Amino acid sequence: MFEIKIWDHCRYVLNRTAPYDEMARHLEACARAGITTANIYLPEVISLPDYCRAAANAGLKVEARIFPAWNNPSPVLRTLPESQWLDMEKRFGIRLGKTCLNHPDNRRIFLKNIAELLDEYAQQLAGVHLDFIRNDNAVLLMPYPCQCEGCRQERHHYFGKELLTSEDLTNPAILYKELDFRNRNVRRTVEDAKKLVGARGLQLTIAARANYLNEPDITTEPVWGLGPAVCEGQDWVDWLNDGIIDAAYPMNYHTDSQTFRQLLTDYKRLAGNNLHRVFSGVGLSSSMGVLTDDALRQHLITVRELGFPGAVIFNKTNIYTENQFTILRESAV
């Protein structure tokens, strides 16, 4: 069976005080379209009990999607002096300073929140899905390494100083160790999450960077970027190899069919014997553009032809046309 999953945000719900009926209608339509799993973003779910009940009645599995700053009232963000923020904005047209996963307080609170989620909802979930399980955009991260307390302590241990100079940033040995502790700290968070989730018999999955190592990237302004994953601490290929995640969903939202196929070919090589645990993301509508019905059909044919077990649809509106549902249903046969 070729499995179709969706990333969901409940953006179709209008009655937010009583969302069940609209959730139920949407998820029933998804089930009729052959979708097996609804991956719901908890900050926008409105009511997780209603969502889980609606999904169960429709015969869908639910993965709860969370991110490192979820339910953390004051996460430690990437820290830089104002002069560097201004330089970043001048060069790239954006300031980007999200949660720093080198800081132990962020890891501790995130794991506590996962444990509390599982205590309440483990019986209603099929899995937990980690979103943004990485540090900031690599294009912005490498020239502006974080200066929070956690990063300073790591550097003092290895380099004997807390801050890097522009000369340091050209030293391959220093850059290697900077990447090493960045990957190690994110991995530690994933390993601990896997222990919590696995103990409840649930799957741990992640939204993976489309660009793992050297795939085509987006570097035009504004630079949101697509990795490379290993520069951001998200070595999802090794995580699959070592069994600390059950599946990866690479966010391959490219609308160009040739680029889309190229990335899938890379994933097939990288995954090897773990290909059955890689579900390609498909961007029906995203910041990278919108797929026509014909392009959606062809993308899904490509995923299937290359031997992947299924696809995960990202649709920023969460609203599907009858034609789109028909294409999904035909692909899932």
Image (cartoon, rainbow, N blue to C red):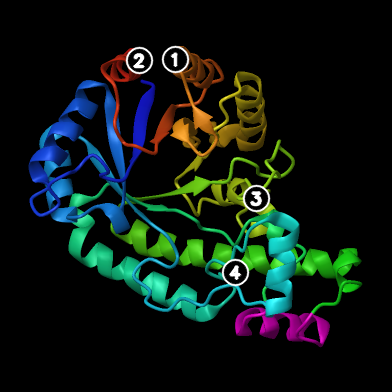
Element carrying mark 1:
helix
Tell me where residue 314 appears, x and y as whole percent.
Answer: 41, 36
Q: Nearer the viewer, mark 1 or mark 4?
A: 1
Tell me if label 2 and label 1 are in contact, CB under 8 Å: yes
The answer to which image quadrant residue 212 occupies is top right
Q: On the image, numbered disc 3 is attached to which residue?
A: 223
- Tell me how far mark 2 sits from mark 1, CA to CA: 6 Å
Q: On the image, numbered disc 2 is attached to which residue?
A: 327
Q: Answer with mark 1 or mark 3, whichever residue precedes in sequence.
A: 3
Element carrying mark 2:
helix
Please give the name of the residue rendered at 71% of the width and 37% of the height, measured from the top-left corner. Answer: 215
- Tell me how far mark 2 sits from mark 3, CA to CA: 33 Å
The answer to which image quadrant residue 325 occupies is top left
The image quadrant where one finds the C terminus is top left
Can residue 56 be seen?
Answer: no
Residue type indicated by callout 2: Ile
Tell me if label 1 and label 3 are in contact, CB under 8 Å: no
Residue type indicated by callout 3: Val
Disc number at residue 185? 4
Element carrying mark 3:
loop
Q: Answer with mark 2 or mark 4, whichever residue precedes in sequence.
A: 4
> What crowding class fits label 4: few (fewer than 14 Cα within 10 Å), some (14-19), or many (20 or more)?
many
Q: Answer with mark 1 or mark 4, whichever residue precedes in sequence.
A: 4
Q: On the image, numbered disc 1 is attached to which residue?
A: 297
Residue type indicated by callout 4: Asn
Q: Answer with mark 4 or mark 3, whichever residue precedes in sequence.
A: 4
Queried whether the magenta region covers residue 149, the answer comes back as yes
Count how many numbered circles sit on residues in the image.
Answer: 4
| Frontmost residue, 219 versus 330 | 219
Q: Answer with mark 2 or mark 1, whichever residue precedes in sequence.
A: 1
